[in-house]
Image: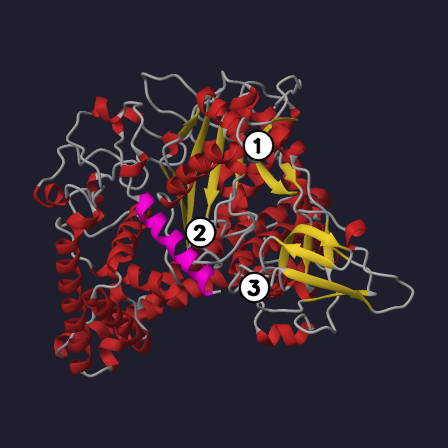
Amino acid sequence: MSDEKPSNKGPSAHIPSADVKYSNPYNGLVYNFYTWLYDFVLFILNILFMIFFREVKVRGGHNIPPVGTPTIIVCAPHANQFIDPSLVMITARKVVYDNDKFDVNRSRQTCFVTAASGFKKPIVGQFGIATGGIPVPRQQDNLSKVDNRIVLYCPDMNKPTVIKGRVTDNSLENPGFTKRFTPKGLVGLPNFLANAKIESIPDDYTIILSSPFKNIDAPIQEKINYHIENGCTFKYAPKVDNSKVFQNVFNHLDTKGCVGIFPEGGSHDRPSLLPIKAGVAIMALGATAADPTLKVSIVPCGLNYFHRQKFRSRAVIEYGEPIIVDGEMGKHYKEDPRGAVSKLLKKVTDALYSVTENAPDYETLMTIQAARRLYKPASNNKKIPLPVVCQVNRNLLLGYSKFKDDPRIINLKTAVQNYNERLYSLGIKDHQVLMLKTGTAANIRTLVVLLNRIIKLGAFFTLALPGTILFTPVFVIAHYYSKKKQEEGLKKSVVKIKGIDLIATWKVMVALGFAPILYITYSLILVYTASTHRNWLSWLWIPFSNKVMQFFYFYGLLVLTTYGSLKTGEVGMDLLKSLAPLFVTLLYPEDTITDIQKLRNELSDEITDICNELGPEVIPNFESYRNSRKSDEDKSDSRSSSVTRSRSSSFSSLFSNALSRVNSRGSLTDIPIFADGRNFNETEDSSSSDEEIDDDNIFPSKITSIIRARRQNEKKEQ
């Protein structure tokens, strides 16, 4: 890799070599063993996700550029560790272009930039290699313990970046920092408490940090003796040279491949995005600087989960409109690396905020979701498609970010939280409130419905029992192992809150490894029983006498039984959840039911009024959406993950510039708070133009700037 010096002072541009010859089996232009292996791995993962997830929806698949276009899919939030990249690879691979005017293939094989430490894991590493993963070394993964005879301490907590060292053994003359360490190396405190980069090393006893250790509060200081001269042991990792990573990414892009990356770094479970790292901008700009004829498409991808850690949860994968990085931007990168990276990084950040939900805290997110359910739409449509739920939440979060200090919003937030607490105490959900009935006749009907559902529930329970018993060992081991990994992850991370991002991954990984072994064991036991105690299985039809055939017969039968029980149990769980409002109707006084329904109606009216009043200050052309309905309301939403529409049948959105329309059954374009924030009175041809959009007028930049300002304030407070 060459480092060209810019004309102005500042960091040098990272420009990979364009002379390296590279054969890329994942660019969609060839098909060989590596390509087949990639598809085989995705086939296995797809089966696993069909079992783990109840529903996975894809939106904006038409935004993925066709085969032959250098592409970087930049994904956020990184909320489900190894599951996140797998879902993106599967959905990007399934997308095709269904339009007679365009004969192009948009099915892409995405190769993810992955932490090098992941390739060392037994199962995960093999999957990473098989799917063309690009390993990237991380300093924190290379931390190793420094000589125990040397300790660190901070002589003055008012100057937390100045760190001193001393020796605890006379066999050492001094700590020898100038010989042991280098600038940009990483220093780590014990028990994964915090890490910090070295800015300079004035002498053998002193280290100047680029920024203080984060989250070093008083109890932690006492625990590690960091703030007193006793000091504490520590770890160190040398500066990492990422030139090979940039070269590998460039090789993929130069051969028209598709690269995936999570710019937040590691996975986390926070309600908002972590600061976006500059790597993705450097990769795209470096590639176009090395080859000015190259045009790299950066596609934002939002991963939105509903109860991500739970079995049979739901997910929405949303692709936004690509950001095009061309040779002119690469030229600017050569001249002013810092400025070019900063400008592109802002665009990427805004694009990611356009396809993700970001709340300042979990409590606010819960309040926003409740407000979305309570808002009264202008149309008669009550069914909101799952992908649109994510967009609605983003619109409401945008409004909340702007008006959160308004007394009406503060009071409304408190009222919604109180309403949620009332629902929790009754054991019901918001959508079940309107199901509650009052009166003698209603109670009789409710009792009949309750008995009917209990009988059905018993039948479904009986049908689901065999498969549940068979799969119980997997459930138990997966639960406890994922909890163990959750605890380990929390110890190693300073950004995780509860470590929920690790649970689903390890549930799937345990099932992947343990379930086949378990069912092979079951099958072998049945084969042995059939040959030695055939009368024990007289109730079971066994069409084969050959033991090998019996084994495959039993294995298939067990798998089908378990899957049938899974689907049956899913219906049973829906029935079980529907019993709560029936019990409330029968057991609670009529006044309690009337009060909760009245409270819901009052909250719904208040939320609707406030949204309609403040909406014009958040969403442009707000009134036009209230008073008009689109003539093309019946156009389909982004179809299944295997079929998408042409760009000419899509329209720009406030949050993702080119989101798909909602189908006529659930269209929300005439609902103010659900509507998109740009003027769409233009013809379809104009909406599909490739004209550059003024980034300063895109609303995600507003919410991004709000969050940036909040982070700056937090830094000042620290």
Label 2 or label 3, whichever comes before in sequence order: 2
Q: Residues within 10 Å of mark 3 (few under 14, many from 20)?
A: few
Question: Which region of the structure is painted magenta?
Answer: 700-717
- Would you say 653 lies left or right of 504 here? left
Residue at numbered disc 1 = 39
Q: Residues within 10 Å of mark 2 (few under 14, many from 20)?
A: many
Callout 1–callout 2 Cβ contact below 8 Å: no
- Would you say 592 lies left or right of 544 here? left
Residue at numbered disc 2 = 273
Callout 3–callout 1 Cβ contact below 8 Å: no
The amino acid type, in three-letter code, at marker 2 is Leu
**Is any atom of residue 551 visible in this view?**
no
The amino acid type, in three-letter code, at marker 1 is Asp
User: Could you say which is closer to the camera, residue 303 or residue 151?
Assistant: 151
Prevailing secondary structure class for the magenta stretch in the rendered image: helix
- The Cα–Cα distance between marks 2 and 3, rounded to whole angstroms, is 40 Å
Q: Quadrant of the N terminus?
A: top right
**Is any atom of residue 632 visible in this view?**
yes
